[in-house]
Amino acid sequence: MASIFSRIVTGEIPSAKVYEDEHTLAFMDINPASRGHTLIICKEEYPGLLDVPPRLVEAVARTTQRVARAIMTTLQPDGLNIVQNNGAAAGQVVFHYHIHIVPRWKGDQVSPFSRQGKADPQELQELATMIGNNMH
Ligand code: AMP
């Protein structure tokens, strides 16, 4: 069965999309660790880092860097955590290769591994549009 992220790629499940190209898709995490928490996925479904062909690891890394720059411009955080979980023991919940970008502000007490609860979909769409408009 297709992963929840594959169903986002096909449009079967809605998402707040930031950016899309041939091999990668970036969208807002519905259950963010901080404001602006964004996921970058490989459109083709592979469970984790160890399974992905290197050319697609590279494609995801390139998109991650571009989205990270756009988040810095848009939200002006003091830093970013880049997180990538492999295996249930490491906290992976969706077994479809993806990278988390978690914006951080000084003194925010955020853990990039914890979640703040479901975000307002309209707010996620606004963030996605703002970040997407700053993609270069
Ligand atoms: P991981 O623990 O690395 O597998 O992270 C999976 C992430 O996917 C979690 O942060 C979830 O909040 C997020 N997530 C799950 N379903 C959706 C969805 N439909 N749209 C956006 N993010 C999702």
Image (spheres, rainbow, N blue to C red):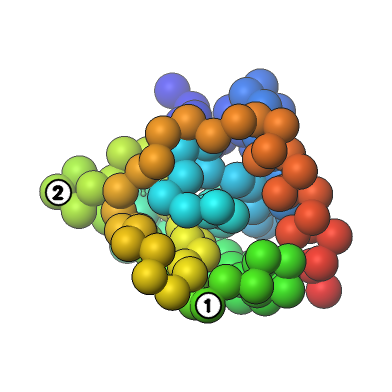
Numbered label attached to residue 78: 1
**The CB of the residue at mark 2 lies under 8 Å from ligand 1:** no
Residue at x 53% of width, y 43% of height: 29
- Work out which residue is located at the far left of the displayed protein and give it: 89
Q: Position of residue 59 (x, y in %)?
A: 61, 68
Question: Dot 1, how many residues are within 10 Å of its Cα: few (below 14), some (14-19), or many (20+)?
Answer: few
Image check: 52 left or right of 21?
left
Q: Position of residue 84 (x, y in %)?
A: 37, 61
Q: Which residue is mark 2?
A: 89
Res 66 visible: no
> In the rendered view, would you say 102 is above or below 107?
above
Q: Inspect the image, locate mark 1, and give the three-letter code of the amino acid beneath it.
A: Asp
Given contact means CB atoms under 8 Å apart, are the residues at marks 2 and 1 in contact? no
Q: Position of residue 62 (x, y in %)?
A: 63, 74
Q: Inspect the image, locate mark 2, and give the three-letter code of the amino acid beneath it.
A: Ala
Question: Dot 2, how many residues are within 10 Å of its Cα: few (below 14), some (14-19), or many (20+)?
Answer: few
Residue at x 40% of width, y 64% of height: 108
Res 90 visible: yes
Frontmost residue, 41 versus 16: 16
Image check: 50 left or right of 42?
left
Ligand 1 resides in the quarter of the picture at top left
Residue at x 32% of width, y 62% of height: 109
